[in-house]
Amino acid sequence: MTIPARSLLILASASPARRQLLRDAGFEPIICPSDLDESQVTLTNPTALVQTLAQLKAEHIADRIRQQPETIAPSAQLADATGGDRAESILVLGCDSVLSLGGKIYGKPASPEEAIARWQEMRGTTGELYTGHALIDTARNVTLVNCAVTRVHFATIDDATIAAYVETGEPLGCAGCFAIDGRGALFVEKIEGCHTNVIGLSLPLLRQMLNELGYAPQNFWAA
């Protein structure tokens, strides 16, 4: 199959960090959050959990594209996003991240109190950040699902520093209760694995998945 020169990526996530990662890499994705009720998935294996959630998010948006594409983006927006030519190929990317620490799986903290308790448990330890990636080629109805894992070594910080960090509000929007592209970088000693995976999306893994589907990253670069 010949891959169209103009292809479009839709990100099934409202995450500003994921959007910025894609923009920095040359993509101009259309943002379309899936609004999935994640409580319906109760898997205890972190890899299975993030892969399942990522796939459900991507499938929800892919179904909307097939049934009601105008609810995703007007034709004019689809054309603008591909440099004036209507996209011939549309891919949907779904992602989900959790932190595994001491055999427990954590998502975003529900309150500042939970964030403080989480950091008191995290400090001085090592956790694994799991991010599931699901990529759907809507034209060919092909789905790829994968997971990236990065080990994160947290610094030993005192209660006052934890309280001050949580007060900024930054940890409340992050599955790992920290943002490595923000103030949270001060409290990470080192990582083992993909850096962008900790932010919410592994760019190397995305490139590999695109290649597996027969695409190159430049197929999605904004003109």
Image (cartoon, rainbow, N blue to C red):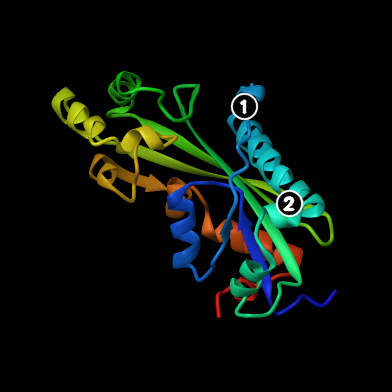
Say what amino acid the circle numbered 1 marks: Asn
Q: Estimate the x, y position of residue 189 in percent, counting from the top left.
A: 27, 43
Rendered-image quadrant of the N terminus: bottom right
User: Circle 1 — which element?
Assistant: loop
Rendered-image quadrant of the C terminus: bottom right
Residue at 66% across, 47% down:
146
In the image, is 92 to the left or to the right of 19? Answer: right
User: Circle 2 — which element?
Assistant: strand
Label placed on residue 45: 1
Residue at 42% across, 53% down:
195
In the displayed structure, 57 sits above or below 126; it is below
Label placed on residue 186: none
Say what amino acid the circle numbered 2 marks: Leu
Dot 2 or dot 1, earlier in sequence: 1
Location of mark 2 (residue):
144
- Asked where in the image residue 132 lies, by quadrant, the reply is top right
In the image, is 168 to the left or to the right of 125? Answer: left
Q: Estimate the x, y position of residue 109 in percent, counting from the top left.
A: 40, 26
**Residue 194 at least partly seen:** no
How packed is label 2: few (under 14 Cα within 10 Å), some, or many (20 or more)? some
In the image, is 39 to the left or to the right of 20? Answer: right
